[in-house]
Amino acid sequence: QTSFQGDLVVLEPAESDAEYFQINPLSFWRRAEAARHGFVTVARDVERNLARLQDLFGRYGLDLDVTRMNMMMERLNDAGKDEDIVEILASPPVPAGWRD
């Protein structure tokens, strides 16, 4: 018998997120819009619950640093074309302090 001991963090769209539920998950042509919306939604949830999440992750010796998330949010705000959005989400930036 296996028993799980730990915490689960579930990130899901809000019931009121009409924009999310209007995007057909099989619509290839709207994939960038769906990806951007998903990232932005999760980022907002992380920001709203940052103190709680930092405490939770800290119990396991993990540091929750939102530097990359914030860098990506800035880049997504400036992105115009679908190709730019896909590139940003596929290649997250590496903050200067994280480089070798």
Image (cartoon, helix red, strand yellow):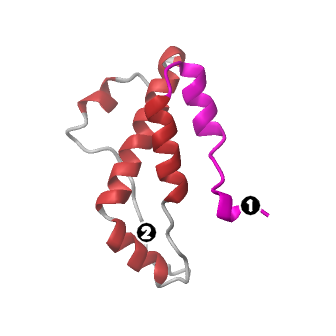
Relative to 40, is 87 on the left or the right? right
Q: Which residue is mark 2?
A: 8
- Above or below, 84 against 91 in this view is above
- Above or below, 3 against 90 in this view is below
- Above or below, 40 against 36 in this view is below
**Cβ–Cβ below 8 Å for labels 1 and 2?**
no
Using the image as rendered, state which of residue 38 and residue 80 is in the foreground: 80
Residue under the point 39% across and 59% down: 10
Relative to 46, is 15 on the left or the right? left
Q: Is residue 97 shown in magenta?
A: yes
Give the Cα distance between marks 1 and 2.
30 Å
Q: Secondary structure at mark 2?
A: loop
Q: Amino acid at mark 1?
A: Arg
Is residue 5 among the parts visible in the rendering? no
Where residue 52 appears, as percent x and y from the top left, is 33, 73
Q: Amino acid at mark 2?
A: Leu
* N-terminal label among 1 and 2: 2
Category of crowding for the residue at label 1, using alpha-carbon neighbours closer than 10 angstroms: few (below 14), some (14–19), many (at least 20): few
Q: Residue furthest right?
A: 100
Image quadrant for the N terminus? bottom right
Where residue 34 appears, as percent x and y from the top left, is 44, 29
Q: Is residue 96 shown in magenta?
A: yes
Q: Residue furthest front?
A: 96
**What stretch of residues is rendered in magenta?**
79-100
Image quadrant for the C terminus? bottom right
The numbered dot on residue 99 is 1
